[in-house]
Amino acid sequence: MTKAQRMIEENLKLVDAVCEILDARIPNASRNPDIDRLAAGKPRLIILNRIDLADPNITAQWRRYFEAQGIKILETDAKSGKGVNQFNQAVREVLKEKIEAYAAKGQANRPLKIMILGIPNVGKSTFINKVAKRKAAIAGDKPGVTRGKQWISIDQGLDLLDTPGILWPKFDSQEVGEMLAITNAIKADVLDKETLAANFMLRLCRLYPDAVKARYKFEPNLEMNGFELLEEAAKKRGFLISRGEYDIERMANTLLGEYHDGKLGRISLEKPE
């Protein structure tokens, strides 16, 4: 992570703007707080990716939240390509003054250089491939696929600098770490998976009780703790180890897997403050 951060600092002087890709389900938790410092003074574009998995009403709240700070927002689902074709226009709006300055110098056709930043497994490489309309960046459904920087030229007069996903040395809270693990930004194995799933189930029952009821066929009771709710789901699924004992580990893996696959519906895990 230190090496990746150093590489980003060294290359910032080469780019016209910084584009930060966030997970629309956890825009705050998926935002590296160091990037504000690293990219200070550079025009910014924030992409809320995976909108297909996020609650659209909460995504709209996040859009208003960032726009109130003067930050340009683009909502995308890089996997299907939704919203990606608006990237070129969004970049040109962010860089309007710089483009005019280039034109005044007789450099109207100069390619715009954009650094693409984001935490691991936020869909950075998939997004770049959709923009480039070819397999220009290595993409994978796990953290840490991109290892080094890579310049990618786009037909629309854009040069994109793909960078490794960087996390920060210490999370602000256990909650942030859990949300990153739930959305697969970090490996869930680094935390106790049953505790992770129990806390996640409790969060779901508070925020989306109807989704829990529809998927796991029980009425959420907020007087129960996360492990009890997880056991209730295991009971409804028939995950029995022995008489009266249910397979909590299997239910934990099932819950996290089904959320990751979008089977619980469009669910966001945090709202703007």
Image: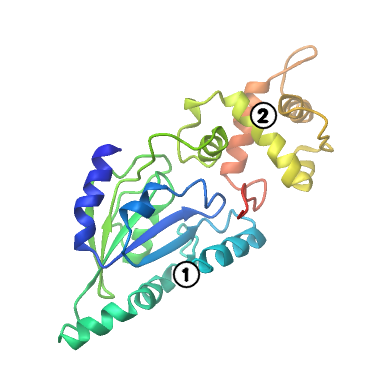
Q: In the rendered image, which residue does mark 1 sit on?
A: 70
- Specify the amino acid type for callout 2: Ala
Name the image colouring: rainbow
Q: Earlier in the sequence, mark 1 or mark 2?
A: 1
What residue do we see at 83% from left, 31% from top? Answer: 223
The percent coordinates of residue 110 (x first, y second) are 19, 77
- Specify the amino acid type for callout 1: Gly
Callout 2: few (<14), some (14-19), or many (20+) C-alpha neighbours within 10 Å?
many
Residue 133 in view of the camera: no
Locate the N terminus by quadrant. Answer: top left
Dot 1 and dot 2 residues touching (CB under 8 Å): no
Callout 1: few (<14), some (14-19), or many (20+) C-alpha neighbours within 10 Å?
few
Helix, strand or loop at mark 2: helix
Residue 26 in view of the camera: yes
Alpha-carbon span between mark 1 and mark 2: 38 Å
Q: In the rendered image, which residue does mark 2 sit on?
A: 198
